[in-house]
Image (spheres, rainbow, N blue to C red):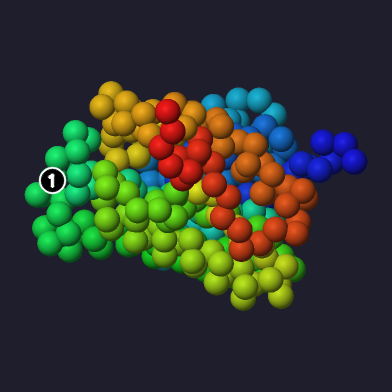
Amino acid sequence: MRAEKLFDVRGIAAIVTGAASGIGLACARVLAANGARVTLMDRDAECLQAAVTDLGSGDAEVRGAIVDVTDRAALNTAFDTAAKAYGRIDVVFANAGIGGGPGFLKLDGQRNPDTALEALSDERWGGNITSNLTSVFWTIQAAVRHMKPQGGGRIIVTTSIAALKTEAVVGTPYLAAKAGAAHLVRQAALELARYNILVNAIAPGPFLTNISGGRMHDAAVRRHHERVTPLKRMAEPEEIMGLALFLASPSASYITGAQMVIDGGATLGFAD
């Protein structure tokens, strides 16, 4: 079996949320470059247009949809429109979300009273749950409504290694939301297997994206992640491409309910 057949996504209809930058854009890029028809969804109209123009500059078939995944009605409409444009929905990357912000420890190891458990606001808690968990649920629902009648599909959710381990320098609401999303993936995979809908998750570690207002590009934040990650560096968004293509392709036809970690060894613990 040749690689081009194992990873053949030519002609499939895909949706990627949070696709205007970072991990979402990388997922959309690798799908489009390999012949998939891709709808990029994002709430940032300017960045979305730039991404669509970039990806569509060659032979790739791409389109954009301005949508906030926390707006359920708008999300459903965007999915219906994408399905009408391409005739079906085969693969959905539920990638959109927000960052967790600082945790109860500062990067210098000192306690941060503003982010202590008892100081967390309802707005910060609710924002993380809505953007990183509820929106994933709504995205899965929107996908399933199209995938069941057509006889199957793939759903890939971006979770985080924060779903697997505690974090002192990442906000508590983010961890709870991502852990919930990870378990939702498993529950959905169990229920939807009968309908040939595969549901999996990608759990990234420290990637250089613009999440949390670009916090990951801050020099102190970068030094922290480089120090505690065994590979001693942060990942570029392009390093998600291989895993994204794999999960969308025929190679992953017997994988469901899995959460695949891509973190430079960060979940293994500290190394010299």
The spot of residue 239 in percent (x, y) is 56, 32
Task: Determine which residue is flagged by label 1.
Answer: 112
- Residue name at image x 56 percent, y 67 percent: 186
- Residue name at image x 67 percent, y 65 percent: 197
The spot of residue 66 in percent (x, y) is 43, 47
Provide the secondary structure element on which disc 1 rests: loop
Whether residue 137 can be seen here: yes
Instruction: Tell which of 81 and 41 is nearer to you.
Output: 41
Instruction: Tell which of 11 and 256 is nearer to you.
Output: 256
Q: Is residue 143 left or right of residue 214?
A: right
Q: Is residue 249 left or right of residue 114?
A: right
Quarter that holds the C terminus: top left
**Total numbered labels:** 1
- Residue name at image x 38 percent, y 46 percent: 43
Judge whether 231 appears above or below 193 on screen: above
Instruction: Tell which of 270 and 264 is nearer to you.
Output: 270
- Residue name at image x 67 percent, y 42 percent: 245
Quarter that holds the N terminus: top right
What's under tag 1, amino acid-wise? Answer: Asn
**Quarter occupied by residue 125:** bottom left
The spot of residue 68 in percent (x, y) is 38, 53
The spot of residue 204 in percent (x, y) is 48, 43
Q: Is residue 119 left or right of residue 265?
A: left
